[in-house]
Amino acid sequence: METWDALTARRNVRAFSPEPISPADLDRILEAGRRSPSSQNWQPWDFVVVTDRAQLQELSHVFAGAYHVADAAAAIAIVGPVADNPYRRAQFDLGQAAMCMELAAADLGIGSSHAGVADMAVARRVLGLPDDRDWVILLSLGYPADRPLAPVRNPKRRPFDEVVHRRRW
């Protein structure tokens, strides 16, 4: 896809077909995260890829909104450090890595959705996280069960002129 098509086709997908994602496509998605922007090139992230069905089902219990992880073809845990600064730059960097991976997935026709983690004890146990890691964003990945990704012409978004302010509010 062209970049604009990937941007306009990407949507949160929470129902996946049973088709697996190839290792090469997973690596391409992970490479997009690795190359994402980072404050002062800090790169505070590590990525844990999960494709095992039992492990995906366990991960889906880290937060009520993470139910879609159970039926995904894969999940990527974007893991960050315990320590951060008052500007929350690690949190921002992890979000950028997530978005880069979601766009790379869309480019490949792979759907995605993100979820937070409320139960770090479960995430720590399932993912084997070290003690010096404490932030996790989960991305579920898979081919959409309902319809393929395609640019959305009329997204359910606030109107452009309501969102964009020029020079002042």
Image (cartoon, rainbow, N blue to C red):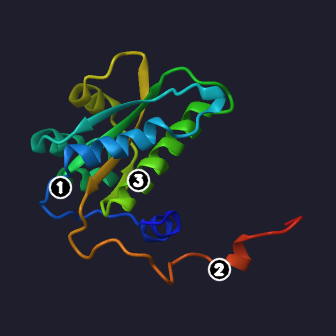
Q: Kindly identify which residue carries mark 1.
A: 71
Nearest to the observer: residue 33 or residue 95: 33
Q: Check disc 1: other Cα within 10 Å, few if <14, some if 14-19, many if 20+.
A: many
Nearest to the observer: residue 47 or residue 125: 47
Residue positioned most to the top? 131
Which residue is painted at 27% across and 49% down in the image? Answer: 25
Q: Secondary structure at mark 3?
A: helix
Q: Secondary structure at mark 2?
A: loop
Is any part of residue 117 visible from this angle?
no
Residue 167, by quadrant, is: bottom right
**Vertically, is 148 above or below 72?**
below
Q: Position of residue 56 (x, y in %)?
A: 18, 44
Q: Secondary structure at mark 1?
A: helix
Mark 2 vs mark 3: in front: 3
Amino acid beneath label 2: Pro
Left or right for 92, reference 135: right
Is any part of residue 158 visible from this angle?
yes
**Vertically, is 96 above or below 136?**
below
Nearest to the observer: residue 65 or residue 29: 29
Distance Cα–Cα, label 2 vs label 3: 26 Å
Q: Kindly identify which residue carries mark 2.
A: 159
Q: Check disc 3: other Cα within 10 Å, few if <14, some if 14-19, many if 20+.
A: many
Which residue is painted at 35% across and 48% down in the image? Answer: 139
Distance Cα–Cα, label 1 vs label 2: 34 Å
Which residue is painted at 23% across and 41% down in the image? Answer: 59
Q: Position of residue 126 (x, y in %)?
A: 21, 30
Residue positioned most to the right? 167
Q: Kindly identify which residue carries mark 3.
A: 104
